[in-house]
Each structure stands twice: as C-alpha cells, then as structure tokens.
Image: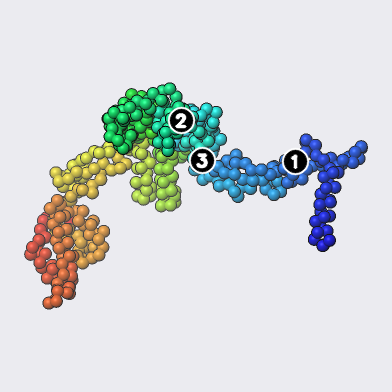
Amino acid sequence: MTRKAIGVFIALLLTITFAVSCKKDSSGVIDTGSGGDSDVVATGSCGDGVKNGSEVCDGGSIGCETLGRYHIGLTSCLADCSGYDLSRCVERDPGDRCGNGVVEKEYYEVCEIGDTKACNEINPNYAAGTYATCADNCRQFDIAPCTAVGNDTCAQIFDCVTACGDESCKEGCVAEGSATGKERYEALMNCFDQNCASGADIKECTEEVCPTDYYNCFPIEKCGNGTVDEGEVCEKGQTKDCGELDPEKYRSGKEAICNSVCTAYDTYMCIPKDALTCYEVYLCIQECGTDTACQDACKAKSYADATTRLNTMTTCYEEQCNNTDNGCYDEKCQFQTDACKTHATCGDGVIDQYEICEKGDKKDCGLVDPNKYEAGTADAICNVNCTRWSTIWCYGFCSCQEVYNCVEQECGGQATTNYDCVDTCMSLGSSEGKPNYKAWRQFITSCCETDQQGNPTKCGFESQACIDKANQDIGCATGDNPKCPY
C-alpha cells in the first residue's frame, strides 16, 4: 500500500471511530458515549450546521435586507460562524428611504422591504394563494412569483389561441375559459368573421368596426383610447392640479397624473397641505441650533422635492459663503434661495409670500424699470421662481453709436473677442440701436478682402475696406438719450 493510500485509510478509520463513539442530541450537545457519571458534555463546532453557544449562524444563506440598511440579495455565514459576510451585501445610500421600515408615500413608496401582497389583489387574473414581494425600490410589488389563472378571461383565451398551431389546441384554450370569457371571445370572433377581410389583423379590425366587443375582451386597452369610458375617471396623459383634485389634502401647484389603468389619479407628485416647504424646513432647522435630533424632526415633516432644494441651497451657503451671510447669500446664492422659498407656491396662480409675479405673467419692460428699459417695445416675463422679472427681451436706450462707445470703453475696442462683453453692451441698446449695431458688426466680421486669385487677405476689423463698406451700406445711427450711460 502506498504512503498516500495508508494516510487515506487511517483518516477514514478515525472518522468511522468518531462516528461510532459520539452522538449529538436534539439540543446540539455532543455526547461522547462513555456512559455513567463520566460522560463529557461539549458544545458543537462551527460547520456542523447547527447554531451552538456563541455562534451567530452556522451555514445557510439569508437575505441582506434582513440585516439592516442593505439592498435585497443573499449572503452566507462566515467561516468562523461569528456573523454574516456583509461584503456580499450592498449598503443603501443615506438618502435612500426604502428599507427603513416605514412606507413613506411622500417618497413615492407603496410598500417596505419584507412586505407581501396577495397576487390576486394586484390583478384578479393571478392565482390566489401566491404573493408578490416588495421590490428593492419600495415603489412597486415584484410580481415574479405570481401566476395567471389559466385562460379565464377573453383576453387570456385570445392570447392562448394566438399561440396555438392547430385547431385542437385552440379548442382547448376556449374550453378552459370562464363562461364570461367564452361569451366575450365568441362575440369578438363573430364580429371579425362578419366584418373583416380574410387575413386581416383581428385586434386591429375589431377595434375599428366593433369597439364595444373589442373593449369587452380587452378592457385594459380602453385606457388610452382618448375617451373617458365607463369605469374610468381620466385618460392616459391627463393631469390635474393636486389642489383641485383634493383641496383639503394637497397644495396647488403640482400635477397629479392619470394612472396606467385610468381608474384614478396618481398623487405621488402632490404636496400634502401640512408638509413643510423647503424654506419652512430651513427656518425650522435654524430654530434648532445644534440639536441634530430637532433638525432631523424638521426634515421628517417635509418631502423629497423640498429636501432636494434645501440641500442645494445649503450647499451653496457652505461652498460660496462658508455659512456666513453678511450679504453673501443674496450675492452668490440668490437663485438657490429663491428656488427654496417659492418652489411650493410658484405656479399656483396666487402671488404668495416671497413672490412678485406668477408663472406666465408678462409686464411691459418700461413698467419694470422706466429708467433702464424702453416702454412699449417688449415685455418682461416672470422668472421660474416667481421672484424676478426676466428682462432678457427688454431694450435699453442706447443708439447704435452709443453701443459702439460701450464696446470701445468696456471691451477693448470693436475687434475684441470678448463676446460676453459685447453682448452686455448690446443689451443696453434700444429697439433700434441693438439690431443696428448687431447688423453692422456682423457685416464686418463676415467680410474679407481678397487678392486677384480670390484668396482672402484681410478680414473683419483688420480690413478698413470692410469697415468702410459697413459704414456705407449699414451705418451706425447716432443718438443722445440721457438715460443711456454712454
């Protein structure tokens, strides 16, 4: 016998001897089998498949989600039975509300990790006794475990028949249907036989010539046909102001969206009336001082959109102003502050606190600032936060020549490549001065002198000939309005 074979034989012999001399009772305690008062009792060892003593686990796998703030997945017991291998689990981001054990509708959740729902409650065509589990994002149930109840409905019969290759199979599909399912399927096929050409698409033709029979068979397809039919409350794509939908429960300004089966409006975008807005949360936190529990309580009274805008504003305060105001917040973070102050009210049709106008409002530029903009030439538009008049379309008082003077003094001359500076000067132009200067400048920048062979020699403001031609053909009108700074 070789040395290797001898080693194997001895190991096998020892294993058999141990198996004969020891036995384990149902409690997991090992009995050495010596009998009498001299029996020796010891705990089981890691790896025997039974959790003993101080062991946290012994073999097997469990879901990561059962161990805390982790995504759904499997992990196994560590080799020393001291715990589970968390390196196999993916930790949730701090801002991920899914997995905290609370169904928070304001974060669009419909369930929490570990929740289940009877499949036939989700869809009556699923078999009873099976359960869907909450998905990893907490926003829907995972219907993978659900199974259809045979060919019960007309639509199920139709799908079954469509997949068949012979008449016997088709007859079997119909036979498995419910009485109502068979009746509706037969009505659909009678319509097809009487009204549709041979070889025509069954669904396409019957939907057109006998829509009643078609939607009796495929009721879910009524949603999206452009008509609010019996049993529906809205149509796909329709929205409704949340405040109009339920004024006792929601604020105005956000839109509820018709759900996928047209039976109700989804309100996940709606803001509860008693929820703190972005700026209300900010003011609440200021009153807390350094009490982090108090600050968390303020945030908990809010909702996702408000929290996002609050984080944007406070990040600007931190990065741009080192959390010290002294006018810095207004100077460097005005837009973020405005967005936080009015995001829940801008667009609700009312000029609320912090607002000066409403979305869609227009105002003659001359009324916005009569010392800066020409009246009667253009309208300013209420900005996205309802806190300012956007004057991008407004005209100033400067003539073409005065815009020219601005470019000379502020931008380093007409040949400049500082186009932002040129745009700033042009924004001072009047309704005649701005387009006049723009046309004059564009002519020159697109003009070139050429040699006898047609090759360009001097272009743009390097060419006096181009400048002279622009002055001759376009000119740059002069003016002297006392409200023009140039």
Classed neighbour count for the residue bearing mark 2: other residues with Cα under 10 Å, few (<14), some (14–19), many (≥20): some
Residue identifier under label 1: 52
Q: Which image quadrant is residue 274 in?
A: top left
Where residue 474 sits in the image (x, y, percent)?
Answer: 9, 61
Question: Callout 1: helix, strand or loop?
Answer: loop
Q: Position of residue 128 (x, y in %)?
A: 52, 27
Tell me if label 2 and label 3 are in contact, CB under 8 Å. Answer: no
Task: Work out whether residue 284 can be spotted.
Answer: no
Instruction: Measure how far apart labels 1 and 3 are at the Cα level.
Output: 33 Å
Q: Amino acid at mark 1?
A: Asn
For residue 172, the mark is 2
Nearer the N terminus, badge 1 or badge 3?
Answer: 1
Between 119 and 160, which is closer to the camera in this rendering? Answer: 160
In the rendered structure, are the residues bearing label 1 and label 2 in contact, judged by CB atoms less than 8 Å apart? no
Q: Judge whether 302 appears above or below 4 on screen.
A: above
Q: Position of residue 39 (x, y in %)?
A: 89, 40
Residue 134: give x, y in percent of width and height: 52, 36
What amino acid is labelled 3 in the image?
Answer: Asp
